[in-house]
Image: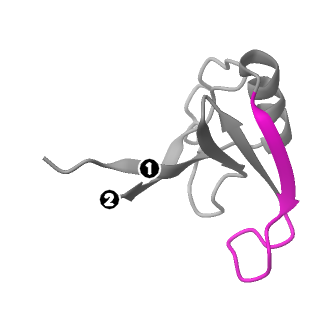
Amino acid sequence: MPEYRYDHIHLRSPDPSATARFFETMFGAELTRDIYPPGTLYPGQMRVRMKVGGQTVLIAPPHPHEQTGPAPGEAPRARRAGTENGFMLCTVAR
């Protein structure tokens, strides 16, 4: 059976810095902040990269064409600090 591993995971958050602080405080994540370069989906916006539990996690703002909150007319979900994020991408390496 083939063995698979992933390179990194993306989290989407309306406030990447606050989400990163949560992981830093609660789980001892090591944070690195930089700016998305030209030609990417978020040029000029802050990007947060963290190492938590030995894994690389990238935190980015919500995708401009995808809804991450409640649908219009829908009640907001309960908010839990640092967990209102969706796993959007898992890069798998063989």
Q: Residue 79's quadrant in the figure?
A: top right
For label 1, the crowd category at 10 Å Cα-Cα, with few meaning under 14, some 14 to 19 and many 20 or more, is few
Q: Residue 16's quadrant in the figure?
A: top right
The amino acid type of the residue labelled 1 equals Tyr
Q: Is residue 86 visible?
A: yes
* Residue 33 point in image, percent of width and height: 86, 51
Classify 24 as above or below 90: above
Left or right: residue 22 versus residue 51 is right
Report the residue at 69% width, 75% height from top. 40
Q: Is residue 30 magenta?
A: yes
* Residue 85 point in image, percent of width and height: 61, 36
Span colored in magenta: 29-45
- Of 80 and 89, nearer the camera is 89
Classify 91 as above or below 81: below
Report the residue at 19% width, 51% height from top. 2
| Distance in Å between CA atoms under marks 1 and 2 | 8 Å
**Helix, strand or loop under label 1:** strand
Classify 42 as above or below 56: below
- Of 45 and 30, nearer the camera is 30
Q: Is residue 15 visible?
A: no
First reached walking from the N terminus: tag 1 or tag 2: 1
For mark 2, what is the residue? 94
For mark 1, what is the residue? 6
Report the residue at 79% width, 68% height from top. 36
Report the residue at 58% width, 42% height from top. 72
Classify 83 as above or below 7: above
Q: What secondary structure characterizes most of the magenta part? A: loop
The amino acid type of the residue labelled 2 equals Arg
**Helix, strand or loop under label 2:** loop
For label 2, the crowd category at 10 Å Cα-Cα, with few meaning under 14, some 14 to 19 and many 20 or more, is few
